Image (cartoon, rainbow, N blue to C red):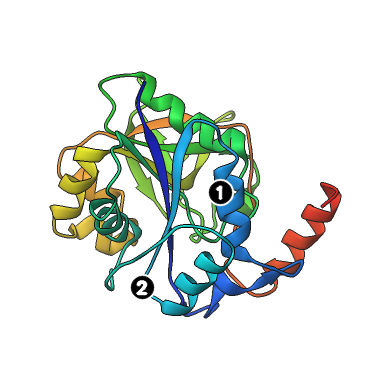
Amino acid sequence: MKKIIAIIPARYSSSRFPGKPLALILGKPMIQWVYERVNQVEEIQGVYVATDDQRIYDEVIKFGGKAIMTGNHNCGGNRLAEAASKIQEEFDIVLNIQGDEPMIKTEMIKDLISAFDDQEVYMATLKKRIYSDEEINNPNIAKLITDKNGYAIYFSRSTIPFNRDGIKDIKYYKHIGVYGYTKEFLQVFASIPQSSLEVSEQLEQLRALENGYKIKVIETMHQSIGVDLPEHIQLVEQELKKEGI
């Protein structure tokens, strides 16, 4: 059986919401909500927070979590690779779960893990079908297209595929920004310089595609609520209360 760990990258600096991982949600810091959700997945043997900020590190240790200090990185994948290299225990698969997803569903994480039932898969992520024009045309929401075997063809902030003739029933999918890597491929990925498409779209997964690597994409039926702005905290609190928390 493959041994799986999860690493949650967490930065303090954010142009739109500084200190976001420590923002309180119903009295508990957001990073703790994420950590505890991920820790509920029985297939995961270890959960870690990777950060370059002492305040986040201290908070994780305070609530009983595991934290790893890293250097400054311009993308989560590189921070993940450094953190993974510092973990002493043996593992086969590394999951990258974003630190601003306090409502990530355990089912979504299980969907991601399922990609590695295929021995040929070394990198995987999730997609979810979207229907509203607002989401389809929103450049803050990354879209993706896949081939018939479920491997990514391209990710973009633009609307893809472009429906030139207004054909009905075109399917659109948004990218859910969680990733899984084999231990070996994560280090390969981090060793590759940023690619031109990655820089242009500001989507780090394009580095893999541009260099000829394949990304398996699993469709999930589940939805989370990410926190990008301070006002999103209230939305998350409302949803948590609906869950009876």
Q: Quick check: 122 left or right of 140? A: left
Residue hosting label 1: 136
Q: Can residue 160 be seen in this view?
A: no
Q: How many marks?
A: 2
Q: Quick check: 154 left or right of 213? A: right
Q: In which quarter of the image is residue 182?
A: top left
Nearer the camera: disc 1 or disc 2: 2
Dot 1 amino acid type: Ile
Image: 202 above or below 121: below
Q: Quick check: 172 left or right of 214? A: right
Q: Quick check: 244 left or right of 73? A: right
Per the model, the C-alpha gap separating discs 1 and 2 is 34 Å
Dot 2 amino acid type: Asp
Residue 141, how many percent across, how many down?
51, 55
Q: Which residue is drawn at 31% across and 49% down?
A: 205
Q: Which residue is drawn at 61% across and 47% down?
A: 37
**Earlier along the polypeptide chain: callout 1 or callout 2?**
2
Asked if disc 1 and disc 2 are in contact, CB closer than 8 Å, the reply is: no
Quarter in which the N terminus is drawn: top left
**Helix, strand or loop under label 2:** loop
Which residue is nearer to you in this view: 207 or 75?
Answer: 75
Q: Which residue is drawn at 50% across and 61% down?
A: 140
Which residue is nearer to you in this view: 176 or 179?
Answer: 179
Q: Is residue 12 visible?
A: yes
Residue 101, how many percent across, how many down?
58, 55
**Helix, strand or loop under label 1:** helix
Residue 240, how many percent across, how many down?
78, 54
Residue hosting label 2: 52
